[in-house]
Image (cartoon, coloured by chain):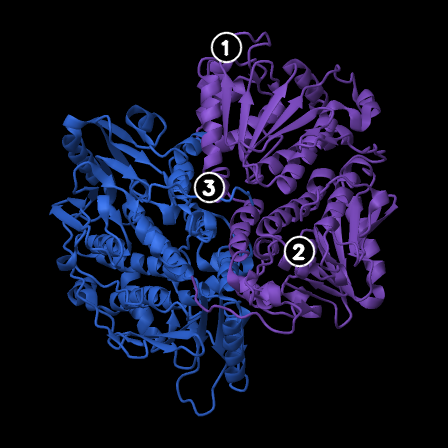
Chain colours: A blue, B purple
Amino acid sequence: MSKIIDFQINPTKYRHWRVEYNDRIATLFMDVDEEGGLFDGYQLKLNSYDLGVDIELADIVQRMRFEHPEVKAVIMRSGKDNVFCAGANIRMLGGAEHAHKVNFCRFTNETRNTYENAGEDSGQQYICAIKGSCAGGGYELALACNHIILTDDGSSNVSLPEVPLLAVLPGTGGLTRVTDKRKIRRDRADVFCSTEEGARGKKALDWGLVDELVANSKFDEVVAKRAGEFADLSKTQENANGITLEPLKREIGSDGSLTYSAVEVSIDQDAGTATISITGPQDAAPQNIDALRGEGAQTWMLRAARELDDAILHLRFNQTELGVVVFKCSGDPTQVLAHERLLLENKQDWFANEILLYWKRILKRIDLTSRSLVALIEPGSCFAGVLSEILFAVDRSYMADGEFEGDNRPVATITLSESNFGLCPMSNNLTRLETRFLEDQDSLAAAKSAIGKSLEAEDANDLGLVTFALDDLDWDDDVRVFLEERASYSPDALTAMEANLRFAGPETMETRIFGRLTAWQNWVFQRPNAVGEEGALQRYGSGIRGKYDKRRV
Amino acid sequence: MSKIIDFQINPTKYRHWRVEYNDRIATLFMDVDEEGGLFDGYQLKLNSYDLGVDIELADIVQRMRFEHPEVKAVIMRSGKDNVFCAGANIRMLGGAEHAHKVNFCRFTNETRNTYENAGEDSGQQYICAIKGSCAGGGYELALACNHIILTDDGSSNVSLPEVPLLAVLPGTGGLTRVTDKRKIRRDRADVFCSTEEGARGKKALDWGLVDELVANSKFDEVVAKRAGEFADLSKTQENANGITLEPLKREIGSDGSLTYSAVEVSIDQDAGTATISITGPQDAAPQNIDALRGEGAQTWMLRAARELDDAILHLRFNQTELGVVVFKCSGDPTQVLAHERLLLENKQDWFANEILLYWKRILKRIDLTSRSLVALIEPGSCFAGVLSEILFAVDRSYMADGEFEGDNRPVATITLSESNFGLCPMSNNLTRLETRFLEDQDSLAAAKSAIGKSLEAEDANDLGLVTFALDDLDWDDDVRVFLEERASYSPDALTAMEANLRFAGPETMETRIFGRLTAWQNWVFQRPNAVGEEGALQRYGSGIRGKYDKRRV
């Protein structure tokens, strides 16, 4: 798996999904091309999926929000007869390296969360219409929808057969959504999740595994009716006209570096670091919402977001040996705040709102990136508003204190805005500053009262906004020693430590999926009973069951 | 590690701890015998610990509550000069099998939780008095105390050096308590947990790692004073006289079976099952609290609890190939309820209260036992009150419906009592019925209105209290098929599935420790960077650092 995995795609290239737009209702057909696997060595039979299928889905969900804001309900269904979706492709999983499996699950989970939240965030409700077998990852696609309709044809069913069949977990949120979203009684969840054949018909409805059971003859009619009803409930802007998400401009250097328009990524393989540098806006903020719409996908707040998102996904999958991601930025903080302010003042406008929601998603993606994350707040930087939110997503931050000899850029500052106080909740549903100052209301209030102030290092440090403030005598050595030290530690221990320290405070379905469920799945993904030569994943399809070491740990 | 690990111990056998009782204050000296390791191959240097050390600590904490209810504050300190505790013994961890490491961490976590809760539950506050180096598991011992005092001698320190030094996590609650209990800012937690030398003096205090910093010359004086103050705050019964926890009567059969007075454990190695059978009280309940005290540790509610606790711990460590634990009971449900009622009506009495608190702890221990748990509610059983709580701890239950041919025992029933509605919260701080009926208030209310009713299978099933009600035509086959099926699945996948399904609803520090932190630690405990030949655990003490695969997953 050494080819570059590219997250940039557009509808002309889809091989696995079709979308039909019909005014307020979009229908999403999953129709996976068996021969269209991202890697060699497996066929995507029975609408099973790999990362390539999910990259298309993520693209559709994203374009639905920016290019098709008129859509208020999305029907997800199968483009094949007799099968809805067989879940993640087993041969792909069997052949994939541990790191790819883990990264694959994280990305699919993020995509599930994105369309699950599209109803509340953007007024786009996802409805799953199931005909045929809906198994494993297929049922997890359904579980993330807002409403599940199952046909009552005597054979169509839902199931989570991973444990009995494959010796792994339903790892894309299945176990968590069964108990915490659908509130299925835990002993019934135990029965359901340890039964290969799952449930169909009345039992699936009675146990709460689906929301609605419909006679096969009435299926299309009811699905259409329900979609109309969900669309009626949507409170988002009517008659919105989307913008176009043009292809990103990106150059990949021979050393792995990435150059976009507002984002650059430099790579230091020896040091094990990737440095993401964001350039603030070069042009003045659009004057009003019409001007914003005129700029479309080229407006700085959206362009930088798309580029940052792509850079992070690229690093996750294509640069697995870089353990540390360094965030920097440069530019004029007042310009960043001006661009942001236009959006904040026009949140009722679908486009302004979607750009802000996109930043919320990207910041969550940063939280969930299993690299050591550090921010360097250097002279000339523009950590302001939503950009300063990055400082509270990283594991630690270093801020340059005062003037640096021979550096004529402006002294480093941080400027908070209202976007640091509610706009971008983490997976735990707290803001990053609430998580940072857990139950310390005084510190939180002090930070809030500093909104709009250009904070130099001493003030930022006093407010608890940075980890270290360093003058130019200490800066180079301290930062270098930290980066060297971090690179010398076990990546696994760091991944696990960071996963524990980043999400203090309350837990939500999302943190349970990424914390508890993912950690257990990662554990299982290493166990010989799953991935060993005689394990279930390797033996799948051979007709021989996996051979298990019976010891419980 | 094939010798039997025995959790029964008493003060005459302690090798690693000393306790001095002085009226309301007990002082607990950790003074580990280097040569007293539970297994061969390592020395317990620098007050490092293994399971044997923790078994003694668990015994002390338990006896403190039953034998020394007069104690209101417990000082935990080191019996050695220059070192408080170096944490879990690294050579022991390096040599232990994966299953032992996981079981060891779970038991130590349970013990930490037990004394952490002793303040709130029993009015026994634990105070940690640190002189010398307090590292890793040593600092985790301290973190679970209610108050941490550090001497300011210029060298005594606290640290969590696991990640930089050993490539594993501070897995006994350290990462969770640092952020969630002590509310240390997450970037500072990142710095602290990736620094071998930890923190001492003013920094330890300023960062919130300790509660109090005391000049070395005043240390003993301040510790004694603080203990007195905590004791003054205790609201529990004055002048209580403890009872004696006599040694349990236990026979271990050649087939591994266990026979106690009120508990039996039969083993079926081929089927992979252990069956725990609890016998209800043979004698009438004590008439009053004096009679209860007269029975002491022999009173049925305490005797059965101690035997059940020992049986579960024995199975966890000594029978790792048995994947399923079956719970049964037999006896007169009205007798069970009578014994329980005396305790419920005398909760203000320290002894009655402690017996009930012990059941709370045991039920949590059952929740956290990583085997498939099933209850069989057969004719003649006595699942009533706190015994019926077992039905809501297990993964699923089968109830005999009506009379069984040729079986003249009474028809199977379940009787709920007030103890099912608040007395025994799970780690998620909900009762098991609240977790079962998550947000389904109607079902919870219906169950509550059935308190005291002798519920036969149909009623129990209608109320959602059992998974399946089966008549005698189906019973044998259905139960057999289930047990066979369960035994055929991968133990790892089941462990992980059960860990996800058992704890729906809110999360607490406890569930985060056992869910998120433990899962990540288990993952790390399998990674070559920690446990491989060139991993940090194997290389520890060799002078050569671990060699790490740098890929992040």
For the residues beneath circles 1 and 3, the answer to whether they share a chain is: yes
Frontmost residue, A164 versus B54: A164
Q: Which mark is residue B490?
A: 3
B485, above or below B383, in the image: below
Q: Which mark is residue B70?
A: none
Residue at the spot of label 1: B402
Q: Is residue B5 left or right of residue B190?
A: right
State the SS at label 2: helix
* CA neighbours of label 2 inside 10 A, class few (<14), some (14 to 19), many (20+): many
User: Mark 1 and 3 residues: CB-CB less than 8 Å, in contact?
Assistant: no
- Mark pair 1, 3: CA separation: 35 Å
Residue at the spot of label 2: B140
Frontmost residue, A5 versus A208: A5
In which image quadrant can residue A551 be found? top right
* Chain containing mark 1: B
- Residue A304 percent coordinates (x, y): 28, 69
* Chain containing mark 3: B
Outermost residue toward the right in this view: B22
Q: Is residue A253 left or right of residue B315?
A: left
